[in-house]
């Protein structure tokens, strides 16, 4: 598919962006909650969303949040792979003078490109710590999730992020950080 301006749906303002991101998160979390429940029903003792240190230099601070950590005699991390992806035509949303083009959005594998150099690790540290710290969520009628991102990697001049159970505000905050760094165009591919 070619990506020309005439083939994109364009909106302005934060509300359409938040609504779209919330839809993508809900689509992902429905499958993630089933994944957790299936492990529990199968008798796999463990916990979802456990913060771990990993020996992976591309991971921010060498940290990741495991999708599910089996804690039996053979402890191991089980990665969640959603079976259904949200389908949509590319969209452009403009906020604070910055165009955000969303060509692809898989909540557990968001690739972020920017028209300026991506912020340094020091500039991202507060954002990363904030979004890997568990927080209360809105879904109190369901099992509580930590509302955290699961991983953040630097790869080839781009970010690759597993937003896990983090709310849309995590992505919005990243966009605002990119905007503060001078970005006028950000793409999710």
Image (cartoon, rainbow, N blue to C red):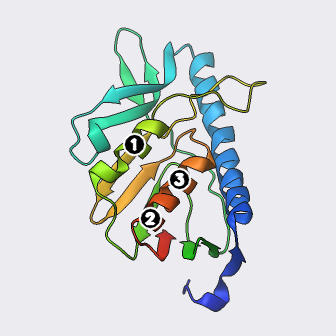
Local crowd size for mark 1, using a 10 Å CA cut-off: few (<14), some (14–19), many (≥20): few
Q: Which residue is at the front of the view, 159 or 128?
A: 128
Q: Are marks 2 and 1 in contact (CB under 8 Å)?
A: no
The residue that appears at 63% across and 17% down in the rendered structure is 41
Check disc 1 and report the residue beneath it: 126
Local crowd size for mark 2, using a 10 Å CA cut-off: few (<14), some (14–19), many (≥20): few
What is the secondary structure assignment of the residue under circle 3? helix
Quarter in which the N terminus is drawn: bottom right
The residue that appears at 67% across and 31% down in the rendered structure is 137
**Residue 76, above or below 123:** above
Check disc 2 and report the residue beneath it: 180
Give x and y (percent) for residue 175: 51, 61
**Mark 2 vs 1, N-terminal side:** 1
Q: Are marks 3 and 1 in contact (CB under 8 Å)?
A: no
Disc 3 to disc 2, C-alpha distance: 11 Å
Q: In this image, 58 relative to 33: left or right? A: left
Check disc 3 and report the residue beneath it: 173
What is the secondary structure assignment of the residue under circle 2? helix
Disc 3 to disc 1, C-alpha distance: 11 Å
Q: Which residue is at the front of the view, 144 or 66?
A: 144
Give x and y (percent) for residue 151: 40, 42
**Mark 3 vs 2, N-terminal side:** 3
What is the secondary structure assignment of the residue under circle 1? helix
Residue that protrudes farthest toward the top in the picture: 73
The residue that appears at 68% across and 69% down in the rendered structure is 88
Q: Which residue is at the front of the view, 111 or 43?
A: 111
Instruction: State which quadrant residue 97 falls in.
Output: bottom right
Q: Which of pointers 3 and 2 indicates the residue nearer the eye?
A: 2
Disc 2 to disc 1, C-alpha distance: 14 Å
Give x and y (percent) for residue 136: 63, 27
**Residue 93, above or below 2:** above
**Residue 158, above or below 150:** below
């Amino acid at each position: 598919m070619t990506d020309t301006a005439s083939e994109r749906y364009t909106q302005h303002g934060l509300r359409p962006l938040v609504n779209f991101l919330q839809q993508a998160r809900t689509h992902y979390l429905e499958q993630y909650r089933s994944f957790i429940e299936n492990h529990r029903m199968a008798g796999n003792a463990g916990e979802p969303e456990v913060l771990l240190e990993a020996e992976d230099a591309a991971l921010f601070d060498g940290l990741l949040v495991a999708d599910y950590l089996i804690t039996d005699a053979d402890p191991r991390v089980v990665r969640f792979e959603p079976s259904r992806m949200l389908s949509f035509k590319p969209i452009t949303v403009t906020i604070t003078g910055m165009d955000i083009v969303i060509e692809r959005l898989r909540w557990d594998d968001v690739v972020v490109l920017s028209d300026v150099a991506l912020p340094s690790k020091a500039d991202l540290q507060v954002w990363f710590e904030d979004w890997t710290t568990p927080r209360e969520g809105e879904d109190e009628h369901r099992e509580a999730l930590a509302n955290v991102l699961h991983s953040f990697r630097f790869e080839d001049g781009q970010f690759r992020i597993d937003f896990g159970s983090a709310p849309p505000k995590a992505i919005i905050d990243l966009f605002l950080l990119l905007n503060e760094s001078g970005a006028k165009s950000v793409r999710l591919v």
